[in-house]
Image (spheres, rainbow, N blue to C red):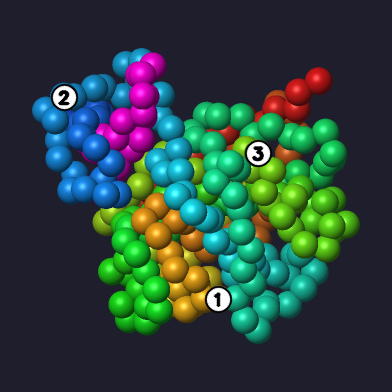
């Protein structure tokens, strides 16, 4: 099941992404599927028919991100794989959706992309074991953990570098059926392939990460865990278009904008 959050000019709604022949449409849902069963209303809206896809979830309380969870990325960043998961937060004000611009702040000149598999929590999770962790997961989406590298170097901690407005594109929808064990994670800038990794290469897998985070803090419905990025990160600037893709989910596309 693929759950999209969308608008046609009115309040955001949710729909199931479905295909018949060459037509992809949204089967509109009543209410928020994070808090109630997915109940179709009977209304169907074709994608592209005045539909704007939004970030499929706005985290209720937090985004927990995992740094250096691919050995090749840790190497390219000039460091070793951490002996314990390296966790940091991104605020929900960083979240934007498909085709929304990543707006470059005037205080940074070195902004990079990071394609990632994102885990969306579906129910209250505290103290989960790796064996039970996936039962708390609603599904998965695509993330771009946009980072101001110069601020990351100078600040000492990553709140500004990782948390500025528009630094977390999410989308295009939540896939509830994905097996996260071994899927491709890719990014392209202006159509050129930059990252091409697989989740099987993660140092710590999804069940471990959900369990590890939940041992420290309660995860709430709508919270998001970012699972790390493979090697190949690089800088972007005004006018670039970044596409992040997770095999089995889809492509998240965002233009990059620097306002005068």
Q: Find residue 214 and report its horizontal and vertical position in percent.
A: 45, 73
Label 2 or label 1, whichever comes before in sequence order: 2
Real-space Cα distance between discs 3 and 2? 34 Å
Q: Is residue 20 above or below residue 50?
A: below
> On the image, which quarter does residue 52 sit in?
top left
Q: Is residue 139 left or right of residue 79?
A: left
Dominant SS of magenta comes to strand
Residue 203's tag is 1
Magenta-tinted stretch: 1-19
Real-space Cα distance between discs 1 and 3? 29 Å
**In front of the other: label 1 or label 3?**
3
User: Mark 2 and 1 residues: CB-CB less than 8 Å, in contact?
Assistant: no
Which quarter of the rendering shows the C terminus? top right
Q: Is residue 30 magenta?
A: no
**In front of the other: label 3 or label 2?**
3
Real-space Cα distance between discs 2 and 1? 43 Å
Residue 165's tag is 3
Q: Find residue 76 and report its horizontal and vertical position in percent.
A: 75, 65
Residue 43's tag is 2
Q: Is residue 235 left or right of residue 166?
A: right
Residue displayed at 21% across by 48% down? 36
Element under disc 3: loop
Q: Is residue 8 magenta?
A: yes
Residue displayed at 46% across by 43% down? 58
Label 1 or label 3, whichever comes before in sequence order: 3
Element under disc 2: strand
Q: Is residue 42 above or below residue 66?
A: above
Q: Find residue 8 and report its horizontal and vertical position in percent.
A: 35, 19
């Amino acid at each position: 099941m693929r759950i999209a959050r969308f608008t046609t000019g009115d309040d955001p709604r949710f729909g199931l992404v479905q295909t018949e022949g060459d037509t992809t449409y949204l089967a509109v849902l009543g209410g928020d599927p994070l808090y109630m069963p997915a109940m179709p209303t009977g209304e169907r809206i074709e994608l592209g028919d005045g539909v704007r896809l939004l970030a499929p979830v706005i985290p209720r309380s937090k985004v927990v991100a995992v740094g250096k969870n691919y050995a090749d990325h840790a190497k390219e960043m000039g460091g070793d794989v951490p002996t314990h998961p390296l966790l940091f937060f991104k605020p929900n004000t960083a979240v934007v959706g498909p085709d929304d611009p990543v707006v470059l702040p005037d205080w940074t000149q070195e902004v990079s992309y990071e394609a990632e598999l994102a885990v969306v929590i579906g129910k209250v999770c505290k103290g989960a074991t790796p064996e039970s962790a996936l039962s708390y997961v609603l599904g998965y989406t695509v993330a771009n953990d946009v980072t101001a590298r110069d601020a990351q170097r100078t600040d000492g901690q990553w709140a500004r570098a990782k948390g500025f407005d528009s630094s977390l594109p999410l989308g295009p929808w939540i896939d509830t059926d994905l097996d996260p064990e071994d899927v491709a994670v890719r990014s392209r800038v202006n159509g050129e392939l930059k990252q091409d990794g697989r989740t099987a290469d993660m140092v710590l897998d999804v069940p471990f990460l959900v369990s590890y985070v939940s041992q420290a803090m309660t995860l709430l419905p709508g919270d998001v865990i970012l699972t790390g990025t493979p090697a190949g990160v690089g800088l972007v600037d005004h006018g670039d278009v970044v596409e992040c893709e997770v095999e089995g989910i889809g492509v998240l596309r965002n233009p990059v904008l620097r306002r005068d």
